[in-house]
Amino acid sequence: MKRYKVAIVEPATVVAEGIAAIVSRGLEGEIAGMVRTVAEMEQLLRTTDVDVVVAAAGLHLELEACAALEEMPVVAIQSALVEEEALRKFSAVATIYTSADELQRIVRKAVDEPAEHNYAESHELSDRERDVLVLVAKGFTNKEIASELNISPHTVISHRKNIVHKTGIRSVAGLTVYAVLNNLIDSDTI
């Protein structure tokens, strides 16, 4: 199995250490460095070989300006509200609710298939998936969603599977947070 050299840029120490543990364990990855700022990341990249950078999505403006990252896959970890347009610039996006297995898969794919792996194309929810997600966040059952959208319960289940696959989030609570963070639902309506 290939050993991935991963650099982590994350201001929150607990999140950075969690990512490092997941990457080290599941990918047999080598942590090339853990830094808190993009400036520190630029310094690290001058002296260290790195296959992929895992970064806080909130640093998107600074990451965009970092010339050293232009040709390198960057996986964003979304823990707060970030505009969808900003997320499209990353190779891939995970949230803090993404499972360890899914994060490992995302990082592996970002390195192994950089040309094919594009967050904007592979992770964007369809209009119908967004409709289903909003109703899930509001606490509707599959049957109630089917009735509300005039589709079969089997179709609802298919949409939910696609949503889980695209977001990496399995729990209703996690999907609700995702819907709020992506402005699909107002937190006051929950």
Image: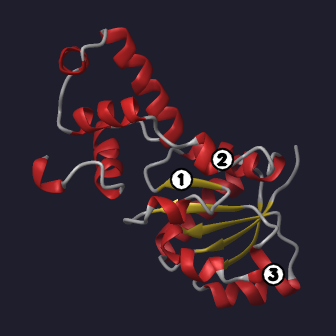
Question: Where residue 149 sits in the image (x, y, percent)?
Answer: 24, 21
Assign a secondary structure to mark 3: helix
**Real-space CA distance between mark 2 and mark 1, rounded to the nearest whole angstrom:** 8 Å
Marks 2/1 in contact by CB < 8 Å: the verdict is yes
Q: Is residue 29 above or below residue 57?
A: above
- Is residue 135 positioned above or below 82 on the image? above
Position of 1 relative to 52 (above/below) = above
Circles 3, 1 touching at the beta carbon (< 8 Å): no
Residue that badge 2 annotates: 106
Pinpoint residue 5: horizontal percent, then vertical percent. 81, 64
Q: Is residue 42 left or right of residue 61?
A: right
Circle 2 packing at 10 Å, graded few (<14), some (14-19), many (20+), is many
Instruction: Please give the name of the residue rendered at 76% of the width and 90% of the height, measured from the top-left corner.
Output: 43
Disc on res. 94: 1
Front one among 14 and 9: 9
Q: Secondary structure at mark 2?
A: helix
- Labels 3 & 2 near each other (Cβ < 8 A): no
Q: Which mark is residue 45?
A: 3
Q: CA distance from mark 3 to mark 1?
A: 22 Å
- Camera-side residue: 10 or 30? 10
| Quarter-of-image position of residue 160 | top left
Q: Residue at x 11, y 55 (%)?
A: 188
In the rendered structure, find residue 113 and report the number of the disc placed on it: none
Residue kind at label 3, given as amino acid type: Leu
**x%, y% of residue 128?**
37, 29
Residue type, numbered disc 2 = Ile
The residue type indicated by label 1 comes to Ala
